[in-house]
Amino acid sequence: MSASRQSIITGLSVIGVLAIQRNLSYNNTKSLLYWRNIPVLSGFIFELAHYKYIDYLLSLSIVVAAADFEISQFIDFVQAVPSLRRVKNLFNKLDDIVDNNSVDQIYAYGEATLGTELSPFLLGLLDHEDKRVVDQLIADNMITRDEMISFCNVLANKLFMQTMLTNDYNLAESDTLKAEIRQQIAKENLEISGCYLALVIHFIKKDPRIKRLILSPGHQGLNYEEISLIYPTVTKAGELMQIAHDTPEFRYDLRNQPRIGKISANYFLAQLESNGCKTDFIKALPALPSRPVTVVELPERTRMVLNKVEHQFINEANKLGTSIGITCRLAWFHNKHVGFYEEKPSYYEKQKLHPPMMACKL
């Protein structure tokens, strides 16, 4: 057999296999021939698609597009990565503490006040090593003490508000009221992401309006609304990154709720509950395979909510400009086509990390 004929046969075989897999993905996802039902292959592709450097690059592209750095600022950003990693690890640690404590335990830390002095809530959470990280950032002239504490207090206040709303959710008797409260919990979570990304960018850009604002006479403490007015594109990009992270992870967060003893702040779960689809999805859970599932495998009403969220996500991303719109859509469709999972990629679990920048939470 000639080499050219062999190449043609090989090419047709590949096309045939792809056509069969495409047909199975729409019409028979339970087939043993469907590649997602082959554990070794499915697991390998899932881990590869969520390889940490791919997630980092997707996140970094959105951050850089939103920040609109000058060349010198981008160089400063690259050089600041080790410091930013320490900050992220600090905030992830605090987030885990809050996630794994009851409402009463969170209240016991104290009130999460705003301003240029560490709130009682943060004083109760931060240990010596945490404070050393903060002091090092200030010593390196990345940010002033008043600015750093103000940002931290905003983030802590959002976490505290989530805890209060979670308690309200547990006490609410009306399904309508529960759905409204859960929407607010998800909103607070998005704003944590927006605030955190604004802090990261502020390390580099150092917009003087932040300092002037918090030091102005009679100012009651930096809040998210003020941050979003100074860094509107960055905060909105942070919120969109959180949505792009939450959506494919909603099965994991739903399954994980009993372990943490409270409802998840996952944005997509809040949309399911708001649209009256939460019960339908919970009933459909036993029929779903444990592997990552595709859109067509989700219950019909869940797909309807997903389409609605996707439409809103793309519209909001496009409003931020061409480059941000493209990078946000790339992250969204990458996560969507990899699948909706109930087990996180192994590198998240091994390092006990949230996805880099995708979960910009305190």
Image: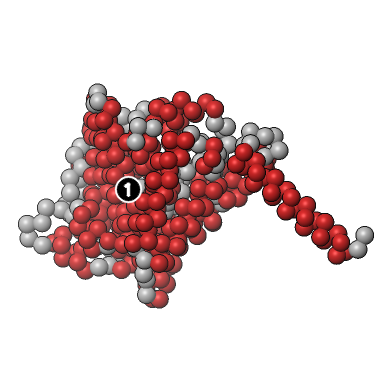
Split into 4 quadrants, where in the image is the N terminus? Answer: bottom right
Observer-nearest of 129 and 361: 361
Residue found at x 29% / y 33% = 179
58 to 276, vertically: above or below = below
298 to 361, vertically: above or below = above
Residue found at x 62% / y 42% = 25
Residue 274 placement: quadrant: top left
Residue furthest right as drawn:
1
Q: How is the image coloured?
A: secondary structure
Q: Position of residue 112 (x, y in %)?
A: 20, 42
149 left or right of 346? left
Pointer 1 local density, CA inside 10 Å: few below 14, some 14–19, many at least 20 = many
Q: Position of residue 277 (x, y in %)?
A: 39, 32
Q: Which residue bears the numbered disc 1?
A: 190
18 left or right of 360? right
Observer-nearest of 298 and 198: 298
117 to 205, vertically: above or below = above
Observer-nearest of 15 and 248: 15
Q: Position of residue 339 (x, y in %)?
A: 54, 43
124 left or right of 22? left
State the SS at label 1: helix
Residue furthest left as drawn:
218
